[in-house]
Image (tube, grey):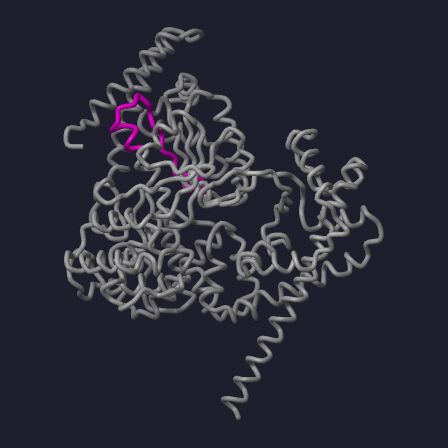
């Protein structure tokens, strides 16, 4: 906006807030009010001006040398809400009317850029709202800090006398939009804590507006006041618009736009409808004749392009390397760096831990390079990392997931099973397991999946055989799951069609327990488990009426409270009978049958492959 003056807008919105506080200043002394006005005026003016500069311009996979205006390249995607398509330019009005919103989208769908564009829109459209942007991944670096404390510390960095009490008073006046970006990037063990805080903030300060972005997560179904929007895939028109806006080699972009419109969008819709992957398609287009069908090959080609290419706006030439490492060694160290950080749930690196982790990664492979030079290569040569405030973050977190997966299937560590069993469950909303399986399914099956299936069978078969009465079976369910509850289930997660209540079993807190393991199996084998369940379940032993009655009991009589499966004796008799006849016990039993079936199938597959290899090579 050529006529936009951020200082003027900020001055007006902050002055308006301070004036409203004077008018409604009951219960606060004159001196305290005066101090509050001065602190808020100082803090908010500088915060908004700084943040506008930060979030209105950014570096991307293509624009790595300089920050660019977000509006010069960003095409905001449409959103879905219960079957309704919400156009991007209408979303600010949706925020003002709905007040509590969760925006979910898959990796690379543009959630963070979407949130930044909302921050910018709120100021540029002069709607009288003060946006506060909270990048939730930074909370992983702050032990035990609350959301309010984090916001206060951000403002106190501008004005040291700013206090929590002052923030809380301002929030009670409304006129604030809290944007919580990246809920899925909070360490798993802390998500429940920050989930409660977000909901409590929304309840206590009812007039504020709240937007939360995340990868899809079933927990959002229980956020009663929040509307859950889904980021929709790019249409062909939006995909063409996105590419058309990018500054790039004119000839390459022109050819890519033509092939994207003629055939590429339909042929590779799952990639071309994702903003990040579409950008990577353009980046790799001049190096390859076609787009690979597998996602890991796509990331591999993108990395090769970044490794060999200095500036996407210029013709290709060999870039300077600070480490001088050949491609294979560089990839090994990068994959070790990624898995070391990922295993400890580090998505944002400070000046100290980034060098410490790089030193460990270099030591794993024994290459001749310094951590400082490798960091410079990551930042300036391949641009996998970028400076982010006082620390560093990945250009996109999916690169960390890809190289973590690459390490898991390539490294020959003696404790490969244990490493996989830890890393696969670090973040169940990520793609590390799926990418690992995509890169080398044989390794994942032989090293981890088959031993894990055998472990599950060994632990659960005796327990199942020992079940004699109804309550024994319910205890068996309790070994697998901690609670029984109900959730809203969408018929179409992408569009967010109409919901209906369904039974849901809550995982135990242990991240790699058997329930989490079966969730991983679902991810790998897609609908195979569902088909097995539908083929083998015995409908004579369960009734839909039991399930419907149990859902009603939890939703109505228990007002949505979960049933604790660890205390069978504490569950009322009628409820126990409903749990037993609704299919929960049969579900656990059939999971065991499926585990034995899958282990047998994989065993035969690998035995045949080993036999073929031996006969073909050894004769």
Which of the pair 56/187 is nearer the observer?
A: 56
Which of the pair 260/312 is nearer the observer?
A: 260
The x, y position of residue 7, in whole percent, is 21, 25
The x, y position of residue 138, in whole percent, is 41, 41
The x, y position of residue 311, in whole percent, is 19, 57
Can I make out residue 47 in this image? Answer: no
Which of the pair 306/527 is nearer the observer?
A: 527
Q: Residue at x 53, y 61 (%)?
A: 420
Q: Residue at x 41, y 26 (%)?
A: 209
Left or right: where 563 falls relative to 304: right
Residue 23 in which image quadrant: top left
Let me know if residue 140 is in the magenta part: yes
> Which quadrant of the rendered structure holds the N terminus?
top left
Q: Residue at x 49, y 40 (%)?
A: 497
Task: Count the labels in the image.
Answer: 0
In this view, 609 is above or below 117: below
What range is drawn magenta here? 119-142
In this view, 157 is above or below 395: above
Can I make out residue 100 in this image? Answer: yes
Left or right: where 36 falls relative to 524: left
In this view, 131 is above or below 383: above
Q: Residue at x 53, y 57 (%)?
A: 523
Let me know if residue 166 is in the magenta part: no
In this view, 141 is above or below 261: above
């Amino acid at each position: 906006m050529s006529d936009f003056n951020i200082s003027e807008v900020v001055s007006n919105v902050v002055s308006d807030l301070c004036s409203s506080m004077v008018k409604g200043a009951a219960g606060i002394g004159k001196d305290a009010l005066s101090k509050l006005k001065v602190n808020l005026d100082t803090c908010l003016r500088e915060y908004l001006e700084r943040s506008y500069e930060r979030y209105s311009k950014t570096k991307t996979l293509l624009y790595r040398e300089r920050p660019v205006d977000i509006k010069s390249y960003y095409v905001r995607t449409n959103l879905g809400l219960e079957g309704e398509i919400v156009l991007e330019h209408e979303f600010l009005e949706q925020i003002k009317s709905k007040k509590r919103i969760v925006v979910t989208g898959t990796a690379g769908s543009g959630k963070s850029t979407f949130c930044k564009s909302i921050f910018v829109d709120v100021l540029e459209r002069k709607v009288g709202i003060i946006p506060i942007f909270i990048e939730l991944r930074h909370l992983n670096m702050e032990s035990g800090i609350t959301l309010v404390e984090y916001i206060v510390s951000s403002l106190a960095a501008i004005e040291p006398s700013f206090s929590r009490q002052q923030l809380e008073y301002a929030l009670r006046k409304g006129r604030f939009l809290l944007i919580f970006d990246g809920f899925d990037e909070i360490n798993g063990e802390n998500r429940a804590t920050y989930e409660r805080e977000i909901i409590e903030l929304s309840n206590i300060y009812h007039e504020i507006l709240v937007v939360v972005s995340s990868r899809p997560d079933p927990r959002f179904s229980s956020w009663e006041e929040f509307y859950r929007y889904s980021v929709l895939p790019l249409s062909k028109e939006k995909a063409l618009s996105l590419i058309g806006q990018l500054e790039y080699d004119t000839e390459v972009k022109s050819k890519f736009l033509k092939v994207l419109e003629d055939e590429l969008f339909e042929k590779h819709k799952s990639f071309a409808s994702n903003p990040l992957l579409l950008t990577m398609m353009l980046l790799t287009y001049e190096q390859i004749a076609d787009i690979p069908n597998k996602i890991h090959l796509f990331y591999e080609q993108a990395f090769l392009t970044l490794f060999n290419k200095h500036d996407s706006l210029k013709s290709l030439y060999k870039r300077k390397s600070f480490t001088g490492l050949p491609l294979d060694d560089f990839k090994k160290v990068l994959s070790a760096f990624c898995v070391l950080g990922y295993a400890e749930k580090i998505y944002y690196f400070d000046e100290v831990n980034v060098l410490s982790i790089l030193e460990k990664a270099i030591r794993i492979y024994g290459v001749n390079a310094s951590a400082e030079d490798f960091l410079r290569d990551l930042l300036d040569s391949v641009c996998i990392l970028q400076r982010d405030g006082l620390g560093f973050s990945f250009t996109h977190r999916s690169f960390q997931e890809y190289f973590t997966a690459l390490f898991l299937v390539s490294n020959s560590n003696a404790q490969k099973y244990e490493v996989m069993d830890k890393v696969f469950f670090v973040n169940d909303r990520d793609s590390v397991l799926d990418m690992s399986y995509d890169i080398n399914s044989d390794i994942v099956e032989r090293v981890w999946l088959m031993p894990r299936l055998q472990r599950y069978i060994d632990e659960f078969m005796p327990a199942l055989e020992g079940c004699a009465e109804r309550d024994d079976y319910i205890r068996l369910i309790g070994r697998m799951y901690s609670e029984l509850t109900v959730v809203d289930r969408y018929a179409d997660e992408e569009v967010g069609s109409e919901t209906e209540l369904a039974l849901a079993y809550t995982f135990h807190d242990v991240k790699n327990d058997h329930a989490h393991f079966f969730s991983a199996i679902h991810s790998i084998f897609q609908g195979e488990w569902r088909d097995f369940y539908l083929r083998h379940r015995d409908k004579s032993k369960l009734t839909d009426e039991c399930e419907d009655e149990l859902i009603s009991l939890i939703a109505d009589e228990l007002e949505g409270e979960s049933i604790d499966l660890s205390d069978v004796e504490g569950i009322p008799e009628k409820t126990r009978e409903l749990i037993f006849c609704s299919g929960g016990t049969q579900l656990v039993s059939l999971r065991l049958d499926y585990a034995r079936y899958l282990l047998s199938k994989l065993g035969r597959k690998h035995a045949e492959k080993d036999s073929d290899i031996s006969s073909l090579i050894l004769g």
